Image (cartoon, rainbow, N blue to C red):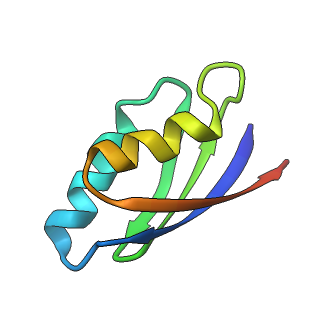
Amino acid sequence: MDTMHLQIDGMSCNHCVSAVRTALDQLDGVSVDAVSVGSADLRYDATKTGRDAVVTAIADAGYTARAESRHS
């Protein structure tokens, strides 16, 4: 599994945290470690879901994400 840290713009409250967590939880092969206002940490199976799909899911929820991934 690869890990990813996301910086997320546009989040300001617990509703935002919930919306981002829900968007990430719906992706195949993604395991969310933490979501807080402005960031998220997750693990993902790159054979099932890529970095672009993660960023797109967050964009679809109404936020802008910048991803930093590390291979484990």
Q: Taking 55 as reference, is 38 above or below it? A: below
Q: Is residue 14 left or right of residue 37?
A: left
Residue 29: x percent and y percent? 56, 27
Residue 33: x percent and y percent? 51, 56
Residue 26: x percent and y percent? 35, 31
Residue 58: x percent and y percent? 38, 49
Instruction: Name the residue at the right extreme.
Output: 72
Q: Taking 68 as reference, is 26 above or below it? A: above
The number of callouts visible is 0
Instruction: State the residue at coordinates (14%, 65%).
Output: 15
Q: Is residue 7 left or right of residue 63?
A: right
Q: Taking 13 as reference, is 4 above or below it? A: above
Pick the front one: 36 or 68: 68
Q: Is residue 1 left or right of residue 15?
A: right
| Residue 66 sits in quarter | bottom right
Image quadrant for the N terminus?
Answer: top right
Instruction: State the residue at coordinates (65%, 54%).
Output: 4
Instruction: State the residue at coordinates (41%, 61%).
Output: 64
| Residue 35 sits in quarter | bottom left
Instruction: State the residue at coordinates (62%, 20%).
Output: 48
